[in-house]
Amino acid sequence: MKMTNRQRILLGAILVAFSATAGAEEKGKIWSGEVELGFVKTGGNTDTQALNGKGKIKQETQKWRNSAAAEAVNIADSGTTTAERYVLSGSTKHKYTARAYAFASAGYENDRFSGFEYQSTEAVGLGYRLLTGPVVILDLEGGPGARQTKENQGDSSNELIAQLGGELDWNVSETAVFNQTLTSEIGDKFTRVKSVSSIKTQVIGRLAMKASLTVRHNSSVPVASKKTDTETALTVVYQF
């Protein structure tokens, strides 16, 4: 997976923010994370295998909210790979008040069957926590950024974008949490939208089950590629 220098710098800055805030505010430090894995295999009339793995870690202090995530998806039909995707993302947010914050984020996606060799973005901006919980938390944010893309055929582009996003966490019950994230990258060449809806239910201890629906839409794609991809997953989650 090839990453741009700008991408490496911003992801590196996010990692530095993790380490810097770790020692700065020990009393207000909260770490959390989860690892999820889903595997499905069918036989008989169809012979398919699907592997879906994700990892996420978060850190929150009195002044900072940091996160990093990685994702890998592989689907094979009768021994032939039909879907393969790798995603890396990270963000750091500095809280000015209990609701308002500034953020910097970076993301990288390598999807073998999307028509693009890679798509990467970096953005900075402002955010606001409309709902503060404890039952419902809602964040909205936006700002300018840059996007780099390269098609499988070799054409590459760099452009400025406007990034808008939001995240909703709803504690449906003591053991169930609904999450909705929506991100939109608006540029001259195309607009990319990603929506992830999920519900996670605690099974026992640190183990949980998660059902999710991911929708990705590009307003303009290479020839023979579809504008919209959907992915439904059922995974086992280990929380720490």
Image (spheres, grey):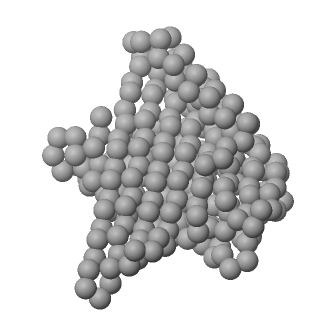
Q: Is residue 119 left or right of residue 182?
A: right
Q: Where is residue 203 in the image (x, y as percent from the top left)?
A: 18, 50
Q: Which residue is more in the foreground, 30 or 96?
A: 30
Q: Which residue is more in the foreground, 120 or 75?
A: 75
Residue 63 sits in quarter: top right
Q: In which quarter of the image is the C terminus?
A: top left
Q: Can residue 154 be seen in this view?
A: yes
Q: Which residue is more in the foreground, 82 or 214?
A: 82
Residue 45 sits in quarter: bottom left
Residue 233's place in the image compared with 13, above or below, is below
Q: Position of residue 61 (x, y in %)?
A: 47, 21
Residue 144's place in the image compared with 101, above or below, is below
Residue at image point 54% right, 51% down: 87
Q: Which residue lies furthest to the front in this view?
A: 79
Q: Position of residue 194 (x, y in %)?
A: 58, 59
Q: Can residue 101 be seen in this view?
A: no
Residue at image point 43% right, 41% down: 56
Q: Which residue is more in the foreground, 83 or 143?
A: 83
Q: Where is residue 15 in the image (x, y as percent from the top left)?
A: 56, 27
Residue at image point 62% right, 45% down: 107
Q: Is residue 1 left or right of residue 190?
A: left
Residue 116's place in the image compared with 43, above or below, is above
Residue at image point 63% right, 26% down: 13
